[in-house]
Image (spheres, rainbow, N blue to C red):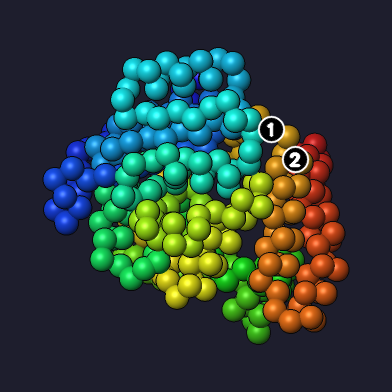
Amino acid sequence: MNGIAAPIVALEAVELPDVLGAHPSVSVVMVVYMTGEALHESVACALRDPSVSELVIVDNGSTDADASELRELAQGDQRVVLLAGHGNVGFARGANLGARKAKGDILVFLNPDAFLQPGCIAELAREIVGRPAPCIIGGRVLNADLTEQRGARRGDITLISALLSLSRLAERVPAWRHYEVHWEGEASPEGPAPVPTISGACFCMRREDFDFVKGFDEKYFLHVEDVDLCWRVRRAGGLVLFHPKAEVVHLGHTSLTSPIRVEFHKGVGLARYFRKRAVGIGQQVTAWVLSPIVVAAAIVRPLLWRFRGRAG
């Protein structure tokens, strides 16, 4: 794994609050699959963070070189736990495997192309203590230029809101603006604030809360499992929070996997999510009828990216 340039600030020692005990137990769970160069820096940032007690790496599939380096890392650092050899079981199932193996009372799920910024883990852990159960807290996800990333905080993602947001009608028609699911353009709150949906790139839950909602739904292979988790937390009467001071730089699109394959899984996940939360015969029929369109729209996206790239 080679290093990759990123706007990383040197991490400073950040103490967790006393309420977590003299030896705070925070496990970072990272699911890896053909991540590329960003993996090395992401792992290094996590291990440099003084609030991280354990790093559980679930290797769903890596190049031979990366797999070898991960094995050496696990052998040389007792904080690193490596799960490998199970093949590509998907993100949701891999994350659940990591959570079951983790020993921490607080679980932080981190993408392998996301770089923790100073104090991120401590901020998340501090805020989750004493919150009503179940609770999930997402960090402020940034682009490489430190602007807030699209999808870091979102509204309730329904079939209607997704269609109106993707078509840009939610932002163009004043009467439909409340359907806009992307909130990164709004002023950032001063402190943790309730939102319907946070990004799965970096978030934390108490172990008992994660177990209470039965973890990730493993019927999602890649993408949308975070949206589903937030929905189930809210459905259980819990709280979803966006924390503006818990920052992480997320590169995105670093996987060596085909973008078309990634978007296909995203489309399949969205279609399943809409069917899952459909209430009544009318909504269920609509969700099933529109499922192929949702999947097709997702597949078209990377094709449009390529076309625009050539056109430009």
Q: Residue at x 60, y 20 (%)?
A: 63
Q: How many marks?
A: 2
**Amino acid type at mark 1:** Thr
Image coords of residue 225 (percent x, y):
59, 54
Q: Left or right: 35 with respect to 273?
A: left
Can residue 251 be seen here? Answer: no
Question: Can you say whether 145 is above or below 153 in the image?
Answer: above
| In front of the other: 101 or 91 | 101
Image coords of residue 272 (percent x, y):
72, 60
Q: Quadrant of the C terminus?
A: top right
Instruction: Identify the secondary structure beneath mark 1.
Output: loop
User: Would you call the spot at circle 1 few (<14 residues within 10 Å), some (14-19), or many (20 or more)?
Assistant: few
**Amino acid type at mark 2:** Arg
| In front of the other: 31 or 174 | 31
Q: Residue at x 16, y 56 (%)?
A: 19
Question: Can you say whether 197 is above or below 107 in the image?
Answer: below
Question: Can you say whether 53 is above or below 61 in the image?
Answer: below
Instruction: Identify the secondary structure beneath mark 2.
Output: helix
- Circles 2 and 1, Cβ within 8 Å, touching? The answer is yes
What is the quadrant of residue 305 in the picture? top right
| In front of the other: 283 or 36 | 283
Query: Which residue reaches farthest bottom?
Result: 175
Label 2 belongs to which residue? 261
Image coords of residue 79 (percent x, y):
32, 30
What is the quadrant of residue 180 in the picture? bottom right
Can residue 208 be seen here? Answer: yes
Label 1 belongs to which residue? 257
